[in-house]
Amino acid sequence: MSSLITEDEISHEKELVWLEDIDALDYVRQSLDRLPTRRGKPAYHRDGRMVGYATLTTSAKASRSSGTFRRRVFWLLPHDRDSEPEGLYATGAPAEAVDPRTLGVGVKGRKTERSEGGPPSDAMRELGITLPL
């Protein structure tokens, strides 16, 4: 879950690589996956599709026990809001979901009104204010 990702776990990130235009997505799911390399597109073994991934700096250390690197992978499932706007996540979002506009290298991101499927109030829109959740 994204809420369980700590910034020290992603402190060796070098770049976030997006495979899709994130401006069209209200949220993406993120997880820390154990991968054999610091960079390159990882293999994807979930339902749905990979939307992006992080690459790591050369100073990132592999796990002593497994020899793998923990890298973030961003993904969506077939029943997520982008594919089923009136479905399960018409409002609300999965626990591991964050607004992709709040993500950055070494920044875990957060939920927003947009990622939760709730429209901002008219007053907030007029003032240009968005509140993080």
Image (cartoon, rainbow, N blue to C red):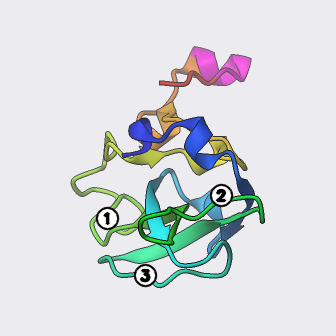
Frontmost residue, 51 versus 118? 51
Q: Secondary structure at mark 3?
A: loop
Which residue is painted at 43% across and 56% down in the image?
31
When the figure is inspected, residue 8 is found, relative to residue 82, above or below; the finding is: above
Residue position marked by numbered label 1 in the rendering: 84
- Residue 132 location, quadrant: top right
Task: Please tell me which of labels 3 and 2 falls first in the chain.
Answer: 2
Q: Magenta span: helix, strand or loop, mainly?
A: helix
Which contiguous range is marked in magenta? Answer: 123-129
Mark 2 vs mark 1: which is more N-terminal?
A: 2
Instruction: Please provide percent x and percent y for residue 73.
Output: 51, 64
Residue linked to disc 2: 23
Query: What percent of the width, then of the height, locates residue 84?
Result: 31, 65
Mark 1 or mark 3: whose residue is earlier in sequence: 3
Mark 2 residue type = Asp
How far separated are the C-alphas under marks 2 and 1? 17 Å
Instruction: Single out the residue that lies furthest toward the front.
Output: 64
User: Does dot 1 land on a helix, a strand or a loop?
Assistant: loop
| Neighbours of disc 1 within 10 Å: few (<14), some (14-19), many (20+) | few
Which dot, 1 or 3, sits closer to the camera? 3
**Picture coordinates of residue 33 (x, y %)?**
44, 64
The answer to whether 41 appears left or right of 46 in the picture is: right
The residue indicated by pointer 3 is 44
How far across and down, in percent of the image, does residue 71 sit?
Answer: 55, 62
Residue at 24 percent across and 57 percent down: it is 87
In this rendering, which labeled residue sits more in front, label 3 or label 2? 3
Inspect the image, locate mark 1, and give the three-letter code of the amino acid beneath it.
Answer: Glu
* Separation (CA) of disc 1 from disc 3: 22 Å
